[in-house]
C-alpha cells in the first residue's frame, strides 16, 4: 500500500453466478481493487451487518475493472451479499493482506479445500502467466460438492479433484491429490506448495510438506475485526524464536510460510 | 468559521476527535489511509511493561449494534514502543496520548516513569480493560485502588494523567470521584461493557476468553449517560468514549459533558470514519447555530423533575 492509494471504493454488482445451492461467484466492478489486488489478498465487503466480511480475491480483470470473489452462504452477512441485485452498490475496502509469493518458483502445487479454493484460481492464473508449471488439486467431501473443476483445469498443467466419498480423480482428501500430483511430476529446485482451505487440510498439507521437505505457503481464515491491522482480532499462532506469538491474519497474513505457523496451537 | 478547538485541562486539541486506544494501533496502518495530523489526537494501543502476546483466538464476536473483543492487551512492551513506535508517531504532527496497562500499582508507576521526557501529550491509565486476569478493570472497580494508582502516577508524570474508566461497576460516578481525588487531570470513559456470545451448535462461547468487551453503536446511549453522570460528579474534564459513529454522536457526547471524544469501533468498520466525521462536523455545527465546538461541552439542559 502506498500513501493516498484509494483503498475504499463503491463497488457495483455486475453478476452473481451460483455454482451450487450454497456457493457463488460475486462479480464486482471495482476498478481500484482490480488494479491493485495480488493473489492471496482479500477485499472487505460491507454486508449489512456491523463488521465487514473478508473474501479472498478469486479473479481480477484490471482492464475491465472487475473483481470476482467466491462466497459460501453461511450466515446473515454472506446471505445478504448473495441477495444483492445486479447494479447494487456496496462499500469495498482493500485489497489488503500479504499474498502468495510469486518469485523463485517454477513448479507450483496448488492445493485447496472448501471456500479456500476461490483465491487459488487467481493464483493459478498469475502463476501461469509467469510461466510457472502448475499442478492443482482440490478436495471435496462428495463429487456433487466439487466446484470449478473446469476453471481449475484450464489454468493447470494437471488438475485433480479429490473426493472423500469416491468418484473423483482421487479417492481421499486434497492431500491425496497433492500426493498423486507429486508422484507424477516430482520437484525442481524451485518447487513450492500453495494451500488454502480449512485448518485440518492445512495441517495435513504441512505434514506432507515436512515429510517431503517441500516449501509451502498456507493461506488462513480468521474472524476479523477490522481487516487492516489495527484491532489485533484475527490472531494466527506463529513461532518467533521458538516462542508462541500471534500474527495478524489481515496484515502478516493471510498467507504464511508453513514453517512460521505454531501448528500445535492452531484450533 | 467554526472554531473546532477543544481544551482538556491544560491541553488544547485542534478538534475534539481522538482515536481511542486499541482501535488505532500505533497509527502506522492508519497512515496508509490519510494523514494523521487531521485528527485531534491519537490514543495508542495499551502498552504494558513486558511484551504480551494476548489471548488465544477467537478474539472477536459480532453482535447486534457492535462487537465483542478479547484481544488481551497484545503489545510489544514499553521498551519496544519507546524505541520503534513512538519516535515515528510523534513525527506525525498529532498529539499522542499513551494508554498504559499494568497488573499492579508499581507497573503503572514504572510505565509512567518510562514515558517521562518522551514528548507525548498525556498518559491514559487503563484501569478498565475487561479481558485480562489482573490489573486494569480489577483496579478500576475499586475506588481506593483507582485513587492510589492515580496518585502514584501523578507523582512521577511530566504530562497530564487521564484515567480511563470501566462501565462495569455499579456507580461509575464514584470511580470518577476516586480518580479526581487521586489527582487525575481528566477521566475518559467508557471502556467496553463485559459481554458474552455462545455458539448454539458447539455450546461453546464464541470467544476463547469466554467473555469479551462490547463496543460499537449499541453502547452509545450507555456511554452517553455515564459521561453525563461523571461530568456532574467531578470538576475535571471528561473525555467521552463509546459507540460514536457519526458527527451527531460527537455533538451529543459533547452536550452530555465531554470536553473531547474518542472514536473507537467506528475505525474498525470504516478506516475513513474519523475524517468523514470531521468533514461533517462544521456543517452540522452551523446548522445548530454553534460557533465553537468547546461551547457545547455540558450544554445539555436536563428536564427538571415536575417540569411540564
Image (cartoon, coloured by chain):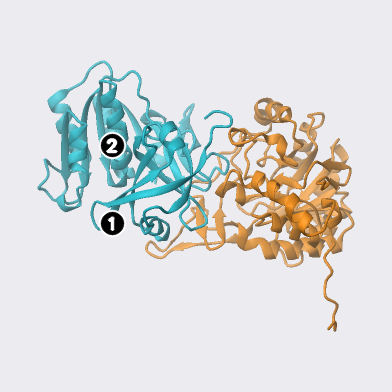
Query: Is the residue marked by circle 1 packed among few (<14), some (14-19), or many (20+) residues within 10 Å?
Result: few
User: Residue A103, relative to residue B46: is it above or below?
Assistant: above
Residue at (67%, 55%) from the top-left corner?
B244
Element class at badge 1: loop
* Residue on which the image places disc 2: A121
Task: Output the chain of dot 2.
Answer: A
Residue at (40%, 59%) from the top-left corner?
A80
Quadrant in the picture for residue B158 = top right
Q: Nearer the viewer, residue A143 or B191?
A: A143
Query: Is the residue marked by circle 2 packed among few (<14), some (14-19), or many (20+) residues within 10 Å?
Result: many
* Residue on which the image places disc 1: A22
State the image coordinates of residue B130 (x, y, percent, origin top left).
63, 54
Image side of residue B250 versus residue A32, left or right:
right
Chain B painted colour: orange
Q: Nearer the viewer, residue B47 or B243?
A: B243
Tag 2–tag 1 contact (CB < 8 Å): no
Asked if marks 2 and 1 fall on the same chain, the answer is yes
Q: Which chain is cyan?
A: A
Residue at (37%, 29%) from the top-left corner?
A100
Quadrant in the picture for residue B202 = bottom left
Count every numbered label the image shows and give the total: 2
Amino acid at each position: 500500500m502506498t500513501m493516498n492509494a484509494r483503498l475504499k471504493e463503491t463497488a457495483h454488482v455486475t453478476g452473481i453466478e451460483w455454482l451450487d445451492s450454497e456457493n457463488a461467484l460475486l462479480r464486482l466492478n471495482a476498478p481500484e481493487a482490480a488494479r491493485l489486488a495480488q493473489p492471496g489478498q482479500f477485499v472487505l465487503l460491507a454486508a449489512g451487518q456491523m463488521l465487514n466480511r473478508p473474501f479472498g480475491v478469486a479473479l481480477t480483470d484490471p482492464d475491465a475493472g472487475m473483481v470476482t470473489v467466491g462466497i459460501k452462504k453461511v450466515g446473515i452477512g454472506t446471505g445478504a451479499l448473495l441477495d444483492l441485485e445486479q447494479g447494487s452498490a456496496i462499500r469495498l475496502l482493500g485489497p489488503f493482506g500479504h499474498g502468495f509469493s510469486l518469485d523463485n518458483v517454477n513448479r507450483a502445487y496448488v492445493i485447496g479445500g472448501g471456500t479456500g479454493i476461490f483465491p487459488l484460481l487467481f493464483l493459478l492464473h498469475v502463476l501461469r502467466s509467469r510461466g510457472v508449471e502448475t499442478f492443482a488439486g482440490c478436495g471435496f467431501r462428495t463429487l456433487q460438492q466439487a466446484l470449478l473443476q473446469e476453471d481449475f483445469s484450464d489454468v493447470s498443467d494437471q488438475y485433480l479433484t479429490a473426493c472423500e466419498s469416491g468418484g473423483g480423480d482421487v479417492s481421499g482428501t486434497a492431500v491425496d491429490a497433492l500426493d498423486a500430483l507429486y508422484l507424477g511430476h516430482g520437484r525442481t529446485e524451485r518447487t513450492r506448495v500453495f494451500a488454502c482451505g480449512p485448518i485440518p487440510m492445512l495441517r495435513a498439507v504441512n505434514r506432507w510438506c515436512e515429510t517431503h521437505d517441500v516449501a509451502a505457503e498456507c493461506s488462513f481464515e480468521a474472524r476479523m475485526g477490522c481487516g487492516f491491522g489495527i484491532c489485533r482480532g484475527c490472531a494466527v499462532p506463529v513461532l518467533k524464536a521458538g516462542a508462541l506469538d500471534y500474527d495478524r491474519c489481515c496484515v502478516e497474513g493471510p498467507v504464511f510460510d508453513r514453517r512460521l505457523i505454531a501448528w500445535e496451537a492452531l484450533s | 468559521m467554526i472554531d473546532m478547538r477543544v481544551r482538556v485541562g491544560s491541553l488544547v486539541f485542534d478538534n475534539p476527535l481522538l482515536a481511542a486506544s486499541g482501535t488505532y494501533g500505533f497509527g502506522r496502518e492508519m497512515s496508509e489511509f490519510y494523514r494523521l495530523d487531521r485528527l485531534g489526537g491519537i490514543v495508542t494501543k495499551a502498552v504494558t511493561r513486558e511484551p504480551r502476546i494476548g489471548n488465544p483466538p477467537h478474539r472477536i464476536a459480532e453482535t447486534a449494534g457492535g462487537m465483542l473483543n478479547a484481544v488481551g492487551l497484545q503489545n510489544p512492551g514499553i521498551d519496544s514502543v519507546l524505541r520503534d513506535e513512538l519516535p515515528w508517531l510523534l513525527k506525525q504532527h498529532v498529539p499522542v496520548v499513551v494508554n498504559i496497562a499494568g497488573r499492579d500499582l508499581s507497573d503503572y508507576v514504572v510505565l509512567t516513569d518510562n514515558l517521562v521526557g518522551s514528548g507525548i501529550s498525556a498518559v491514559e491509565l487503563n484501569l478498565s480493560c475487561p479481558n485480562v486476569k489482573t490489573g486494569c478493570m480489577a483496579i478500576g472497580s475499586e475506588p481506593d485502588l483507582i485513587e492510589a494508582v492515580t496518585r502514584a502516577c501523578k507523582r512521577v508524570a511530566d504530562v497530564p494523567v487521564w484515567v480511563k474508566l470501566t462501565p462495569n461497576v455499579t456507580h461509575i460516578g464514584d470511580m470518577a470521584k476516586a480518580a479526581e481525588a487521586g489527582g487525575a487531570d481528566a477521566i475518559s470513559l467508557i471502556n467496553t461493557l463485559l459481554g458474552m456470545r455462545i455458539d448454539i451448535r458447539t455450546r461453546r462461547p464464541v470467544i476463547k476468553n469466554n467473555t469479551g468487551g462490547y463496543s460499537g453503536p449499541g453502547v452509545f446511549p450507555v456511554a452517553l449517560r455515564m459521561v453525563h453522570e461523571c461530568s456532574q460528579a467531578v470538576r475535571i474534564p471528561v473525555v467521552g468514549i463509546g459507540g460514536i459513529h457519526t458527527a451527531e454522536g460527537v455533538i451529543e457526547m459533547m452536550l452530555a459533558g465531554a470536553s473531547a471524544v474518542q472514536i473507537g469501533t467506528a475505525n474498525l468498520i470504516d478506516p475513513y470514519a474519523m475524517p468523514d466525521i470531521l468533514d461533517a462536523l462544521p456543517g452540522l455545527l452551523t446548522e445548530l447555530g454553534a460557533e465553537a465546538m468547546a461551547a457545547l461541552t455540558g450544554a445539555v439542559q436536563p428536564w427538571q423533575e415536575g417540569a411540564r
